[in-house]
Image (cartoon, rainbow, N blue to C red):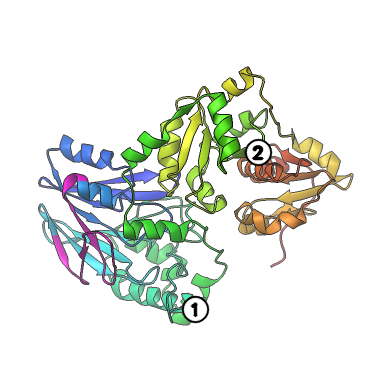
Amino acid sequence: MIIEQIYTGCLAQGSYYIESNGEVAIVDPLREVQDYIDRAENNNAKIKFIFETHFHADFVSGHVTLAKKTGAKIVYGPSAKTNFKSIIAQDNQVFKVGNITITMLHTPGHTLESSCFLLKDKDGKDFALFSGDTLFLGDVGRPDLAQKGHFSEKDLAGFLYDSLRNKIMTLADDVIVYPAHGAGSACGKNLSKETIGTIGNQKKTNYALRANMTKEEFIKEVTDGLLPPPAYFPLNVKLNKEGYKNIDDIIKTSAKPLSVIDFELIANETDAIILDVRHQSEFIKGFIPQSIFIGIDGGFAPWVGALIKDIQQPILLVTPQGKEADTIIRLSRVGFDNVLGYLDGSFASWKKLDKEVDTLESVSVDVLEQKINESALVFDVRKPGEFASEHIKIAESTPLDFLNNHISEFPKKKKFYVHCAGGYRSVIAASILKARGFHNVIDVSGGYAAVRKTTIQRAAAVC
């Protein structure tokens, strides 16, 4: 038996390759599926099943493409409805893969069709649980994404409580837990950085699996402090239910090198966003005016999804040379398929023709400390939880996730400073603000990590 976790850090997402006696099952595949096919072929094995733990909201799964390429059967839990051929399994339905079995456990709560898949070894012993978004390490799935009809998030949280107590906590402590996500995912609140655990460890450490926890306590704790989900979540659910284009076709149509002249022409004649994915240190030194920065070296795809509301939005890319296809793939993982092309030769080709260039002012924390003494305005674009933990005393909380809700708070004329934890998110925020006419924005290099090394007055938020 082979179990391989294929973890994608950008999405904080785990998919799984399971093989036994020449047969393979894939759990929650990424949209680009060739890696799974290659693994099976290299082992002279055949992909038999594609198990989907639920309709994913944070990424476009590869189930449709993988089924077409391999003939494997797609399996969802009860109540799922798809626009493509699939098996809608019953609770406790058993699927045989080589010498092992995989049992579908219906665990509604995160969504109504949410299910876990329990792998039993060749001797029939419970071995591993592929827990999807039902159980994470340190957390459980948020219950507010699938509110329908008369079901509220509290109703779903109640379903989740029952699913955990009746289906998961009854398993033996040594059963391995393979979740769909780790730290960084917006599908939960307090996910661990670890990506593999055990049922026993989760019973000891996961707040939501506390012994003697009442349903009322669970509902309150699980729903408390939930931030609104990113705007792209329902759009990804729709694609996962209805189907989507083959990613190979997306790459063919999107990976178009554009000369500076053609790039500029398309930018002027369409409503395309110019998305610059170079490192923030390169971006601040020079970029095409009106560009939005979201660096490919950070949490790229989720930030694109959170900040660009329409997945049909036309996009023009400025990438590091050699990163064009990778950028297109990572955009497609969250459903952004409408890339019109990329600047051939990257930003260097733009500068070579002496085209107009914009820059972003960035200062050290030493300069910030001096400016704070002169009554500078400071805006903190970290998440609310980070701000609550500790912040510059005079700073205003304007989280990047919800920057559009705070636009009126930024001054039009007086210079102001933005910072995050390390410098990535603040440059994203500053680029958006510059594109909206706030040319008085200044980035703080090094972010709050650098602030901690100064004497700048700090405070914990009052709870």
Residue where numbered disc 2 is placed: 290
Q: Which residues are magenta?
A: 69-95
Splitting the image into 4 quarters, where does residue 93 fall?
bottom left
Name the residue type under label 1.
Glu
> x, y percentage for residue 44?
12, 38
> x, y percentage for residue 118?
23, 62
* Residue 9 showing in the rendered view: no
Query: The C terminus lies in which quarter of the figure?
Result: bottom right
Judged from this view, the residue extending furthest toward the front is 269
Residue shown at 57%/25% (left/top)?
Answer: 261
Splitting the image into 4 quarters, where does residue 122 fall?
bottom left
Judged from this view, the residue extending furthest toward the top is 352
* Residue 266 showing in the rendered view: yes
Using the image, determine if residue 28 lies above or below residue 216: above
> x, y percentage for residue 154?
47, 78
Name the residue type under label 2.
Gln
Which of the pair 329/90 is nearer the observer?
Answer: 329
Q: Tag 1 or tag 2, which sits nearer the N-term?
A: 1
* Main SS, magenta residues: loop
